[in-house]
Image (cartoon, grey):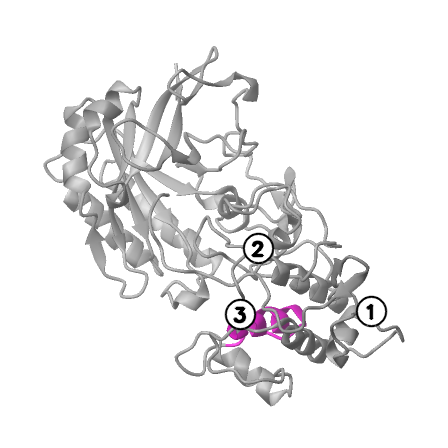
């Protein structure tokens, strides 16, 4: 959703363009990792394995530089070492201690774990972690004779960059997140872990399954299957996505928070918008404190006065079901004296470990328990509950067997979603333009049974 978040992330992977990683199905949440990009397969594979997240929930920053801490975690995990808990205030300190104790640290001076790391140091780290040695006698690079660069080349970790009739290693250059993703995938392959990734939480015992991001995902047949005809989604004269068939019609919607500033709701309504999902509040990713969105009541009153139907969402950082219940109660208390016609939505999204969020390391079972606790509590209060997420989390993290019967708000920024389950609202664009709202805003379509 169009909300500002702090950084988030580890990422992943290779130095060059010629990837040997397996192709993956579409479905990554990152807006800056297009399906046709050279690094897509690497990022998808690592995201599926939970080795990388992003700068925030929908941004990967493929051109961003990788730090020592990020490199240590990715290479060590890909090489077969287990996850390491922090030993001091930095999230990667456990990986640093392990690398130091095992003699794996690359040469060079690093001021902090947030220092950048260059290609030669990445080659040394990977070579040491995998216990590799030279297998060829050729000297491929015109700009480096470093032994670890040559070992990494011999073993397929680095391939070099062609410049005319030369092959360059660029030994002192930093490594981007996209490049690091490819490197990490190659380390995984060299280690012999193969492709695939973790099993989806939704139904692991057999039955109907789909392929998603290189993983066989068993689906819950108790949840209705997507019934919509993709050929009937059309854009109207205002540029909003619409739908109509014998069974379903649609409504046009937006979702907003304080980041959209002051909104002219009369203009929004006049442009053809039927509903709005307003951010009611959020839990701090560091403090855990609950807070109300500073524009919530203004947007609530003015949207309803303009004839726009309203629902609300809460940006959760709950780490226990009790906290999720507290968030639901916070929403209900904030709505006292007001009527809404759309659901109360649970919106839990991850931060990267580098941010130091309190949700770091939250397992899928607890995430599902928190989600269910919020939805159950909202339902008990007499409101309509809904869960918001993207295909990756619906397929690979949330146990859909426990969420049967709850409405789905799908975030999927593609020209046409092939999401398996029936969704009630589809957030199809994150940079839409709507009269009355300055800047970009998320665009949504609700499918309504006739």
Query: Looking at the image, do the residues carrying marks 2 and 1 touch, with CB atoms under 8 Å apart?
Result: no
Q: Magenta region, mostly helix, strand or loop?
A: helix
Label 2: few (<14), some (14–19) or many (≥20) C-alpha neighbours in 10 Å: many
The relative height of residue 252 versus residue 137 in the rendered view (above or below) is above
In the picture of the structure, the residue carrying the numbered disc 1 is 140
In the picture of the structure, the residue carrying the numbered disc 2 is 47
Is residue 72 within the magenta segment? Answer: yes
- Camera-side residue: 87 or 264? 264
The relative height of residue 184 versus residue 402 in the rendered view (above or below) is below
The quarter of the displayed image where residue 167 is located: bottom right
Q: Which of marks 2 and 1 is in front?
A: 1
Q: Position of residue 347 (x, y in %)?
A: 36, 46
Q: Is residue 176 left or right of residue 359?
A: right
The secondary element bearing badge 3 is classed as helix
Q: Quadrant of the C terminus?
A: top left
Q: Distance between the residues labelled 2 and 3?
A: 14 Å
Q: How far apart are marks 3 and 1 (CA)?
A: 28 Å
Q: Where is residue 349 in the image (x, y as percent from the top left)?
A: 40, 52
The quarter of the displayed image where residue 231 is located: top right
Closer to the chain start, of discs 3 and 1, is: 3
The quarter of the displayed image where residue 137 is located: bottom right
Closer to the chain start, of discs 2 and 1, is: 2
Label 3: few (<14), some (14–19) or many (≥20) C-alpha neighbours in 10 Å: many
Label 1: few (<14), some (14–19) or many (≥20) C-alpha neighbours in 10 Å: some
In the picture of the structure, the residue carrying the numbered disc 3 is 70
The relative height of residue 171 versus residue 277 in the rendered view (above or below) is below
Q: Is residue 138 left or right of residue 17?
A: right
Q: Where is residue 67 in the image (x, y as percent from the top left)?
A: 52, 71
Closer to the chain start, of discs 2 and 3, is: 2
Q: In this view, does 153 lie to the left or right of 122?
A: right
| Range covered by the magenta-colored residues | 68-84
């Amino acid at each position: 959703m169009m909300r500002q978040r702090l950084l988030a992330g580890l990422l992943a992977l290779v130095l060059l363009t010629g990837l040997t990683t397996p192709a993956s199905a579409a479905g990554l949440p990152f807006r800056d990792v297009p399906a046709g990009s050279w690094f897509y397969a690497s990022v998808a594979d690592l995201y599926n394995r939970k080795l990388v997240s992003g700068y925030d929930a929908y941004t990967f920053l493929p051109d961003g530089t990788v730090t020592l801490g990020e490199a240590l975690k990715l290479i060590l995990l890909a090489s077969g070492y287990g996850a390491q808990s922090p030993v001091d205030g930095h999230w990667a300190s456990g990986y640093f201690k392990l690398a130091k104790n095992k003699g794996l640290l690359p040469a060079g001076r690093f001021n902090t774990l947030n220092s950048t790391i260059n290609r030669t140091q990445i080659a040394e780290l990977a070579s040491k972690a995998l216990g590799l040695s030279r297998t060829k006698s050729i000297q491929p690079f015109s700009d480096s004779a470093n032994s670890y660069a040559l070992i990494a080349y011999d073993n397929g970790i680095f391939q070099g960059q062609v410049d005319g009739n030369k092959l360059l290693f660029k030994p002192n250059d930093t490594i981007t997140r996209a490049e690091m993703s490819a490197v990490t995938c190659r380390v995984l392959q060299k280690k012999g872990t193969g492709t695939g990734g973790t099993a989806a939480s939704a139904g692991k015992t057999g039955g109907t399954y789909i392929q998603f991001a290189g993983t066989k995902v068993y689906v819950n047949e108790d949840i209705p299957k997507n019934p919509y005809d993709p050929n009937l989604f059309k854009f109207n004269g205002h540029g909003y996505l619409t739908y109509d068939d014998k069974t379903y019609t649609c409504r046009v919607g937006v979702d907003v928070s304080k980041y959209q500033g002051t909104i002219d709701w009369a203009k929004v309504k006049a442009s053809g918008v039927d509903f709005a999902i307003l951010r009611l509040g959020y839990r701090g990713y560091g403090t855990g404190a609950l807070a109300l969105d500073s524009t919530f009541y203004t947007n609530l009153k003015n949207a309803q006065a303009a004839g726009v139907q309203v629902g609300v969402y809460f940006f959760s950082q709950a780490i226990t079901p009790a906290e999720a219940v507290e968030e639901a109660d916070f929403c209900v208390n904030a709505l006292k004296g007001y009527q809404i016609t759309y659901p109360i939505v649970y919106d839990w999204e991850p931060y990267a470990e580098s941010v130091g969020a309190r949700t770091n390391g939250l397992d899928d079972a607890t995430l599902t328990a928190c989600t269910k606790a919020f939805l159950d509590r909202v339902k008990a209060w007499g409101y309509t509950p809904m869960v918001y997420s993207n295909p990756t989390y619906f397929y690979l993290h949330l146990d859909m067997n426990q969420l049967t019967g709850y409405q789905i708000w799908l975030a999927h920024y593609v020209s046409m979603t092939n999401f398996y389950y029936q969704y009630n609202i589809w957030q199809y664009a994150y940079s839409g333009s709507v009269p009355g709202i300055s800047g970009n805003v998320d665009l949504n379509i609700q499918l309504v049974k006739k």
